[in-house]
Each structure stands twice: as C-alpha cells, then as structure tokens.
Image: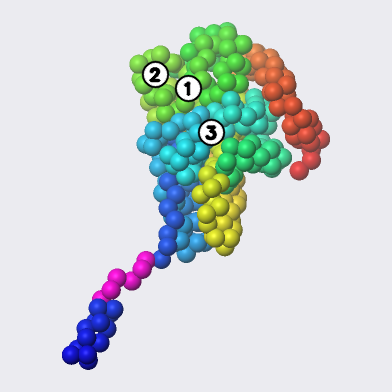
Amino acid sequence: MRLLSIVAGGLLLLHAPVPACAQTVWDMATEYPQSAMPGLAMTAFAEHVAALTGGKVVVRPSFDATAGIRSADMLAAIAQGRVQAGDAFAGSLGAEDAIFALPSLPFLVTSIMDAHRLADLARPYIAAALHKRGQRLLYLTPWPPSGIWSKRLLRTAADLAGLSIRTYDKVSREVFARAGAKASSISFAEMMPLLTNGSINAVLSSGDGDIGRTLSKYLPYFTEITYSLPMSVASVNQAAFDRLTPELREAVDSAGRLTETESWVTLSSRLQQNYQRMRERGVTIDPAPAPALIAALHEGAAAARQEWCVRSGPACENILGAFKAGKP
C-alpha cells in the first residue's frame, strides 16, 4: 500500500499543471488609426517589447479611440489606470504643460532635420513634465508636415475667412482665428461627424496614412503650407514600469528608443508616399500657395510663439535659444 501511495503521488506530480512564465500585460491606446505614424509606432513598439523581453511584457495596442480615450485625456487615463500606456498628440496636451505645445508651434520648423533637432532639445523637458504626472516617456513620434484640406482651392488670404476649419490644438485654433477663419480645436476622434454633416469645410492635418483616405472623400484640395511637423508622445504609468525587473525596464526603454529611431527613418519617405496616395484619390495638391495667404497665417504665428514663451518660462530661451543657434 505504501508503494502504491508513492507511485500515485508521483503520477499526480507528473500531471500537475506547470506554472506559466510570469507575464506583464499593458494596454496601450491611441485615437489614431493603425496606419498613421503613431499607430505604426505603437505596433512596432509592441513587437520590440515582446522580442526584447522574451514575451515577459506584452503590449496590447488599441487604435481609433476604441478605448474611448482622446489625446487630451490620455495622461489622465494612464494616471487613473484605465490603460497602462498610451499615445497622445502632443499639442492636445498643451493644457497639461506648455512644453507639449512646442512641437506644433506654427512655422517654427520647415524640415525633418529641424523637427528632429527640436525634438531632441525638448525631450528632457517633456520627460520631466510626464514625470510630474507619474509617467515615463517611452518615445516621441514625428508627424509629416501639416497642411490645409479644403473643399475649394485657396487662392488668396481672403479665402481663409470662408473656412470652418478643424484645428488640432489651442495654438492652431488661435492662429487661424486671427487670420479670419472660423476655427475649432477638435480631436481626430470627434472630427468625422462634423465633416460628414458639413459643420466644418476644412481640416488642418497632414492626412497621414488612412487619415488621408477619409479626408479625400470630403475635401479634394490640399494646400501645402508646412504649418508644423508636430509630434505625438507615448508614455507609460511610472508605477507599472517600476514593477518590472531592472532587466525588463531596460528592455522596454530599448524598445522605445528603437521605435523612435525607426519613426524618424520612416518619416523621410512618408510625405511623398502620402502625396502619391492623395493624387491617386483625386486630391489636388497646391505646393505653392499665395504669399498673402501664408503671410496672414504668419501674423498669428508670431503672436502664438510669443504667448508660448510667456507660458513656458525658462524653457522658451533654453530650447528656442539653442534651436535658433543651431545647437543639437
């Protein structure tokens, strides 16, 4: 009987469930489509995290605001634990801290090289602003240059007065309002119903990825004004990050650095890819808008940059001073 008990015990051990490898799962949200630059970056980040942690950390992305979170509410959602991580359009976070409005200041950068340099100068300030809110910067995602999508070709500065335009943050709303347009700051997730019912007849956007497919159905003209090369910010709840082992934390940080590097490489050819898709959908691209139209927008842009400097304090001189001096 004793032998039978030993054998039976051994068989039970053989059939006992094997403990699964401990796994951390982070939900990560964005209001943008998977095909847009932030969506591509989130997909890549999830893949890099899985590879570099050996599957011990899993990032579950959600796109198109399916988690019910807009960019402006992303930091609060992460702090509250609705998601562990998220991507938000930086300009939409301007009410949280002035530093987030920096990348979308109008006519500050006109090239990818300058946008990259500005991002590097702003990074420690963005990271500090996130840290104050209990979050850690994962990576920054650049966007292609913003232009004006409209129902009609914009020929003169007076045409701006006929626009009911969706802008993407407080600064762009004020710039277009000063130029005579009826401007409203509207999140991408809330834009479509207004575009469909005709409440807006123009959109400030790059039209990146499938965003362009959507806009081209209603707005057949794109005026290339290179308003800004804005950015999105990806962050994670610091407490969730701190619960990882040191090795896993380094792997996640490495995944973020790799994701950002890849995004800048992608951006170098993204604009022409977007333009090709736009032309295929019948969009007329105006690469040389009337100087008077640009001048009207520049007037509001100068005031916007001045107001930003007042709000941002020392960051204005530290960042913009170094940027204008050509420092890396």
Residue 89 badge:
3
Magenta-drawn stretch, dominant element (helix, strand or loop):
loop
Density class for disc 1 (Cα within 10 Å; few <14, some 14-19, many ≥20) is some
Q: Amino acid at mark 2?
A: Leu
Q: Nearer the viewer, mark 2 or mark 3?
A: 3
Q: Residue at x 25, y 78 (%)?
A: 12
For residue 194, the mark is 2
Within-10-Å neighbours for mark 2: few <14, some 14–19, many 20+: few
Q: Residues within 10 Å of mark 3 (few under 14, many from 20)?
A: many
Whole-percent x, y for residue 290 in the image: 62, 16
Amino acid under label 3?
Phe
Q: Nearer the viewer, residue 324 or 153?
A: 324
Q: Is residue 18 left or right of residue 158?
A: left
Tell me the magenta residue range. 15-20
Q: Quadrant of the N terminus?
A: bottom left
Q: Residue at x 81, y 35 (%)?
A: 325
Marks 2 and 3, the one that precedes in the sequence: 3
Name the image quarter holding the C terminus: top right
The quadrant holding residue 111 is: top right
Mark linked to residue 186? 1
> Alpha-carbon distance for marks 2 and 3?
20 Å
Mark 1 touching mark 2, by CB under 8 A?
yes
